[in-house]
Amino acid sequence: MFEEAFLKVGERLGSLQARVVAALVLSSVVFMLLVATAAYAWFNPLALCRQQSSSLFFGTAIADQGRVEAADWDRFVDEVIVPRFPDGFTLLAGQGAWRSSRTGAAVREDSHILLVLHEGDGESDQALDAIAAEYKTRFRQESVLRADQCARYRF
């Protein structure tokens, strides 16, 4: 009789131990998934955004050549920006300042700012990169600044 009671207690403890181990394994897996998701969001904050606001900042000074004239900018908008974002965008005028990586000199210049609200998709990302690359090539620019943010918009 003592042996039967002892075996029953052992079975119950074994079953309890198995449940405890399973719960610990499951909670460890969930914790690791949460940590991985948090790390992914930390290093790629736009990955979880369904809608985004992106801005490109275009300087107008051309090294040793003067500046991008209004007619040249208008042609660039019509030829390069409109085809990539036919549903709409906003253009703003600005005044920028930056330090040249070539000369180290501080440069102040008029600038154009493109603001686009878009779905957080690869197509929009590629279109913005292509616009910046074309501007740098066409107007011999060192860089075009790009700023992306999570957004929520509706019409």
Image (spheres, rainbow, N blue to C red):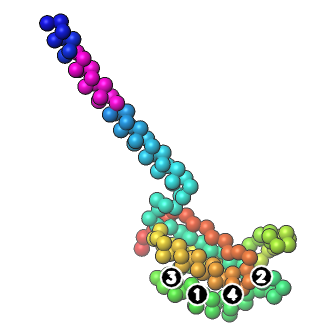
Q: Is residue 91 above or below residue 146?
A: below
In three-dimensional space, the C-alpha distance between marks 1 and 3, rounded to whole angstroms, equals 9 Å
Left or right relative to 29: residue 84: right
Q: Is residue 70 above or below residue 128?
A: below
Residue tagged 4 = 138
In three-dimensional space, the C-alpha distance between marks 2 and 4, rounded to whole angstroms, equals 12 Å
Amino acid type, callout 3: Phe
**Label number found at residue 61:** 2
Amino acid type, callout 2: Ala
**Label number found at residue 80:** 1
Counting residues from the N terminus, which is met first, the one under dot 2 or under dot 3?
2
Amino acid type, callout 4: Arg
**Label number found at residue 85:** 3
Q: Residues within 10 Å of mark 1 (few under 14, many from 20)?
A: some
Instruction: Specify start and end residues of the magenta stretch as a single range.
Output: 9-21
Secondary element at image label 3:
loop
Secondary element at image label 1:
helix
Mark whose residue sits in front, 3 or 4: 4
Q: Residues within 10 Å of mark 4 (few under 14, many from 20)?
A: few
Name the residue located 55 percent from the left edge and 64 percent from the top edge: 149
In three-dimensional space, the C-alpha distance between marks 4 and 1, rounded to whole angstroms, equals 11 Å
Counting residues from the N terminus, which is met first, the one under dot 3 or under dot 4?
3
Residue ranking furthest to the top = 2
Counting residues from the N terminus, which is met first, the one under dot 1 or under dot 2?
2
Mark whose residue sits in front, 2 or 4: 4
